[in-house]
Amino acid sequence: MARSSTIKKQLAWAFWALNGAVITGFWVSGATGELASGDIVAVGHALARLFGLLATFCALTQFVLMGRAGWLEPIFGLDRLAIFHRRNGIAVLALILLHSSLMVITRTLLTGGVLPEGAQQVLGLPYVWLAVIAEILFIATAVTSIVMVVARLRFELWYAVHMLNYAAIILVPFHQFANGSDFLINPTFAIYWMALYVFTAVNMLVWRFGRPLWLFWWHHFTVQKVVAETPTANSVYISGKNLQRFTAKGGQFVMVRFLDKHRFWQEHPFSLSALPSSDHIRLTVRALGDFTNGIPSLAPGTPVVVSGPHGAFTHEKQVKSKVAYIAGGIGITPLRAMIEERAEAGGKNSAVLLYGNRTAADTALLSELTQFGERIQMPIYTVLSEEKSKEQGYIDKERIARLVPDIAERDVFLCGPPPMMAGVKQALKELGVPDGQVHYERFSLHKK
């Protein structure tokens, strides 16, 4: 399975690179005269067009990356796609700024005027004013993303600004087809360019919007009940129709939108803390912010839009016969579902769980984990950082080596707060666990 996953990743990257190469090839064929002229202004004008083409290609890539495409997301996992999405977003912004500034500069030099006149001439071209609006929207998105990380901007504002990107990408092609010499002289390139837009639109309509709406219609998801697991964690049971057809692997997560007056416009990712059953799916959520603090107030009967399941953090990543599950806090939720999956498969004496929390009261789902542990002879070590216990402290190198001496011979599935995960990954590296045996997934998709 690991080899198959690698091949799929390589094919996905090759598909993306091939499209980039095709775009560059079309541009070269249309810019041959300018490139061969040796005139720096002509070359600059040609490069401005290339930057614009690549900016649009990368912008379309952004939508596919986070469109939850069923053919792409299982290969990488939504968290890895989110990382590339952020990095690719930087490329979009840089290419847009290079395109617009070079267009103004070269236009000014070609006409022998001054910059304000050159800018006015560019703005006077058909539909360029729409492109300017799109550029402003893309810049706003980049700025809010930076502020989100540095100043903890509210998720709702960040999400609202990002929704404007749909308007931005629609505004872009008007000025391209009206003014772009690469399209005007090469109808094949124009058709290919339209095909890229259609491909992106189909992906978004089917996977981002169509599938969640279809699931909502087919399953009629509603909140069944909210159960307190610890003083700070609650399980949300979501019932519905035809749930025997809603399947998920242990470790996967869903995006949920609770349709009440306080939360209907917010969508958040939560791990499935149990495998789906014939009458409900379950999420276990720790109170960590405005949205999660309000989970206990969810009323039974509240409709829920569910997107998913998502995520490549599953047993399909496993390359060794034995595993170690390492959880910190609410990071236990995907691992709990994975352990249930292992118990159902009947695998015994092949797993161990290290579960870190501040206090015993914070240790969610422990009774369920204990039952699974007994079924598959899985040792469970609870580590408490702020309370006296047999294992008091943190899940560190010394503790991992002592409790799991054969750790280098196991796959490790890791989930928890980012600082904890960083520390454990470093400890595993020092203990000789190959990178290919360490599996983890981040669920804060809108943050670094």
Image (cartoon, grey):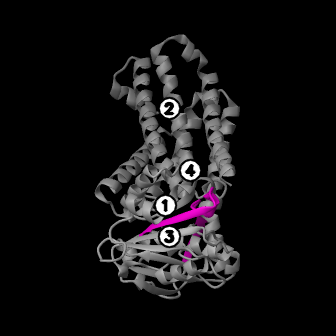
> Residue at 64% across / 28% down in the picture?
26
Tags 2 and 1 in contact by the CB under 8 Å rule?
Answer: no
- Residue 189 to residue 218: above or below: above
User: Mark 1 to mark 4: distance in Å?
Assistant: 19 Å
| Mark 2–mark 1 distance (CA, rounded to whole Å) | 53 Å
> Mark 3: few, some, or many residues within 10 Å (few <14, many ≥20)?
many
Q: Where is mark 4, residue-wise? A: 436
Quarter of the image where one finds residue 376:
bottom right
Q: Which residue is mark 3?
A: 353
Label 4 SS: helix
Sequence order check: which comes first, mark 2 or mark 3? Answer: 2
Q: Which residues are magenta?
A: 304-328
Residue of label 2: 51
Circle 2 — which element? Answer: helix
Labels 1 and 4: the sequence-earlier one: 1
Q: Would you call the spot at circle 1 few (<14 residues within 10 Å), some (14-19), or many (20 or more)? A: few
Identify the residue at image location x=54%, y=81%: 303
Task: Please determine whether, in this image, residue 99 is positioned above or below residue 391.
Answer: above
In this figure, which residue is indicated by the disc labeled 1? Answer: 405
Do residues under tags 1 and 4 come within 8 Å of each other at their CB atoms? no
Inter-mark Cα distance, 3 to 1:
13 Å
Which quadrant is the N terminus positioned in? bottom right
Mark-to-mark CA distance, 3 and 4:
19 Å
* Label located before the other in sequence (3 or 4): 3
